[in-house]
Image (tube, helix red, strand yellow):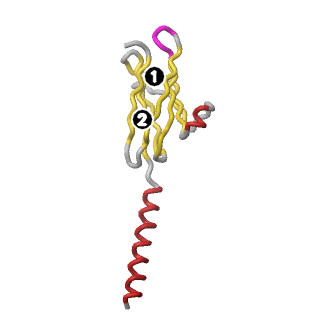
Amino acid sequence: MRHRALKTTLSCLGAVLIASVLCACGQTGDLVITYLQSGQPSSGNDVYVAADQATFDRNEYDYTDRTDSAGVVSFTELEPGKYFYEVAGEGPTGLFDLIEGTADVVAGETTQVTVTGGRQ
């Protein structure tokens, strides 16, 4: 009788473990990057995002977009993990700003990053 109860308990624990793994795998997070130029939102700036350092170092990106009128770009439904980003914009003196950084995306959350270019 104890053997059957133990087998049933182990089967139930296995089902719970499999269900939790399946639920965790489907969760994603969002990355929102705001670009400020001399303290003001800057639109039309290219933002590049890569999921790993090697890809980023080769200037190959998984996601690209441009900032909107509020200086914001959103990347949604990303797998959790570390992302490498680069924001490209024209600085106040006409020189090109190229700002790089990293952000950790967490499942079920929105990671917000503010990037500042130019002189303040």
* Outermost residue to the top: 93
**Other-residue count near label 2 (Cα within 10 Å), few / some / many at <14 / 14–19 / ≥20:** some
Q: Name the residue: 54% across, 40% down.
A: 51
Residue, disc 1 = 43
Q: Are marks 2 and 1 in contact (CB under 8 Å)?
A: no
**What is the secondary structure assignment of the residue under circle 1?**
loop
Residue 92 within the magenta-colored segment of the rendering: yes
Left or right of 9 in this view: 62: right
Q: Name the residue: 44% across, 36% down.
A: 103
Tell which of 69 and 59 is nearer to you. Answer: 59
Q: Quadrant of the C terminus?
A: top left
Rendering coords of residue 107 (x, y %): 41, 48
Against 10, is 51 above or below? above
Q: Main secondary structure of the magenta part?
A: loop
Q: Name the residue: 51% across, 34% down.
A: 84
Rendering coords of residue 97 (x, y %): 50, 18
- Whole-number angstrom distance, CA of label 2 to CA of label 1: 14 Å
Against 6, is 94 above or below? above
Is tag 2's residue or tag 1's residue first in the polypeptide sequence? 2
Tell which of 73 and 107 is nearer to you. Answer: 107
| Figure label count | 2
Rendering coords of residue 34 (x, y %): 41, 28
Q: Name the residue: 47% across, 38% down.
A: 75
Residue 74 within the magenta-colored segment of the rendering: no
Residue, disc 2 = 32
Q: Amino acid at mark 2?
A: Val
Tell which of 70 and 88 is nearer to you. Answer: 88
Q: Amino acid at mark 1?
A: Ser
* Outermost residue to the front: 2
Please state the extent of the stretch shown in magenta in the rendering: 90-94
